[in-house]
Amino acid sequence: MTTHTAPVFYLGAHQPHWLWNADFPLFVSHRQLARKVTLRPARARWALDSGGFTELSMHGRWMTTPEEYADAVARYADQIGQLDFAAPQDWMCEPFMVERTGLSVREHQERTVANYLHLRQIAPQLPFMPVLQGWTLADYLTCMRLYDSAGVNLAALPRVGLGSVCRRQSTAEIATIVAALHSAGLSLHGFGVKAGGLHRYGHRLASADSMAWSYAARRLPALPGCTGHKNCANCLTYATQWRTRLLTQLHQRGHQGDLFDHDTGRTAA
């Protein structure tokens, strides 16, 4: 089992070029990064979002094949480097997403597990992360059993994603789910965790990402000195300051101990 001694906070980034400018861990979408013709080594560690939420919302199914996605991830790993993990082509289980695809939660779970197995088979050298999908705690436990039946020991892996929780990250329901999965020995990654979620259950996460800074910036005027944009929703300066404030607050309130520290993220896991 791989152990992460310092859980990581990945700042969500709209702009792939931040990989070459930021000195802290980033979470970048494949849908944005795929547009980049020229890539170069990242300055800090990072993780890849498959862009599944957008793809399923738009099409009701995956249009990108596993082979196409694996080829892209291989390119990123080779040319950018410092890739901690890549999310699979999972199937989210929010009620509106299940309605969009016309499938059941169980079918979404089975397709999520099957995709992880497929990606691992065709590209075993790449750091694909399994993701648990569901809506209720019972759903997530069922998904765990699906992985187990497929021969995947989730507790032995460095990270397991917790899907379909982004829009309810700060709720007591998600805190209960996180606690149960943490007790089962899983090193969880929280997708799209807002500040409230980090305060409530961040100490039980192995890592997390958040784009909350951008939503906050969109409602405010641009920072003094920021020219060329009306707000800072895509501004590295604002994002850096937001990240610093958040991590400082977490440490001051004593919720996180050594979690989500202020390191530059230059040391890979």
Image (cartoon, grey):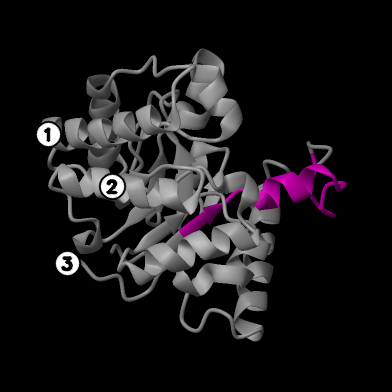
Name the residue type under label 2: Gly
* Residue depicted at x 36% and y 27%: 107
On the image, the x and y values in percent for residue 267 come to 32, 67
Name the residue type under label 3: Met
Residue 168 shown left or right of residue 110 in the figure: right
Residue 224 lies within the magenta run? yes
Query: Which residue is disc 1 drawn over?
Result: 121
* Residue depicted at x 55% and y 48%: 165
Give how far apart the Cα atoms at labels 2 and 3 are: 22 Å
Q: Secondary structure at mark 3?
A: loop
On the image, the x and y values in percent for residue 38 come to 37, 28
Q: Secondary structure at mark 2?
A: loop
Comparing 96 with 71, the one in front is 96
Please report the bounds of the magenta region as a residue range. 208-227
Residue 204 lies within the magenta run? no
Going from the N terminus, do you reach mark 2 or mark 1 first?
A: 2
Give how far apart the Cα atoms at labels 2 and 1 are: 21 Å
Query: Which residue is disc 2 drawn over?
Result: 81
Residue 247 shown left or right of residue 242 in the figure: left
Comparing 183 with 86, the one in front is 183
As drawn, the label of residue 1 is 3
Contact between marks 3 and 1 (CB within 8 A): the answer is no
Going from the N terminus, do you reach mark 2 or mark 3 first?
A: 3
